[in-house]
Amino acid sequence: MKCIIIDDEKIARAALKKLCEKVDFLESVAEFNNPLEAIDFLNKEEIDLVFLDIHMPDFSGFDFLSSVKNVPEVIITTSDDNFGVQAFEYDVSDYILKPVSTPRFIKAVNKVRDERMSAERNEPDSKEKHIFINVNSRLVRLNYDDILFMEARGDYVQIQTPQKKHLVHATMKRFAEKLPPNRFVQVHRSYIVNINKIVDIEDNSILIAEEIIPISRSNKDELLNRLNTI
């Protein structure tokens, strides 16, 4: 993740840069003692994370947060413990007190990274559009849009597409972990369905193509929460 440091204290900036160098997924690309200069930089460059001090001359960290339209993830780094509640009103990722210890720094940046990864996995426009399945020792590519539903068959899972059925030696749990949750939902212990292929829902059943699929009582609320309903 590309990050910048905004702090009017040179020693504080140096300490944060040194901490960034200890984390392999962080790249500190710029430092600023003036938040206004940082805003100009953000208007030109794409940054993932900002380490931001609160108390700075003329233009505070809160002024910065109010001025940036598309603010990246922000971790507040400050010696003042009185503004935690106000900071989180700006939806910052974390609030760390100076001097920043290595364990506390690692915890904060790991949180940002994990949340970003989770968001990317659940992003409807994710670049992943397919899955590979093992059929008779061959890897077969299936586009998500072609999958209607999946049905558990003992030690196998049968995948239904408009053209054919694929029988895969796997568990439903394995597929539930691999498939994007914005596209697929488990509606029964034996069925996972493509949300975009649902034609009709009535009582405890779903119609997909010409197949009627049961919905378990425990999964129905989850399904309804995923649907765009009026």
Image (cartoon, helix red, strand yellow):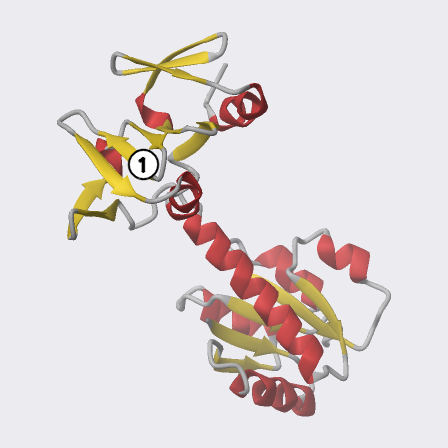
User: Label 1's element?
Assistant: strand
Q: Is any part of residue 72 visible from this angle?
A: no
Q: Nearer the viewer, residue 60 or 199?
A: 199
What residue occupies the far front of the structure in this picture?
A: 154
Note whether 160 is above or below 46 in the view shown.
above
The total number of labels drawn is 1
Q: Read off the residue under disc 1.
A: 157
Q: Position of residue 180 (x, y in %)?
A: 39, 43
Q: Nearer the viewer, residue 43 or 122?
A: 122
Amino acid carrying label 1: it is Val
Note whether 91 is above or below 202 in the view shown.
below
Indicate left or right for 1 with 128 as reference: right
Q: Residue at x 44, y 42 (%)?
A: 173
Are there few (<14), some (14-19), or many (20+) residues within 10 Å of tag 1?
many
Q: Quadrant of residue 46 in the image?
A: bottom left
Indicate left or right for 70 with 33 as reference: left
Q: Position of residue 14 (x, y in %)?
A: 61, 91
Q: Nearer the viewer, residue 55 or 13?
A: 13
Q: Is any part of residue 123 visible from this angle?
A: yes
Q: Residue at x 68, y 92 (%)?
A: 11
Q: Quadrant of residue 68 in the image?
A: bottom right
Q: Residue at x 57, y 19 (%)?
A: 217
What residue occupies the far right of the structure in this picture?
A: 82
Note whether 78 is above or below 205 in the view shown.
below
Q: Position of residue 89 (x, y in %)?
A: 72, 51
Q: Residue at x 16, y 52 (%)?
A: 137
Q: Position of residue 24 (x, y in %)?
A: 47, 81
Q: Quadrant of residue 52 in the image?
A: bottom right
Q: Nearer the viewer, residue 148 or 48?
A: 148
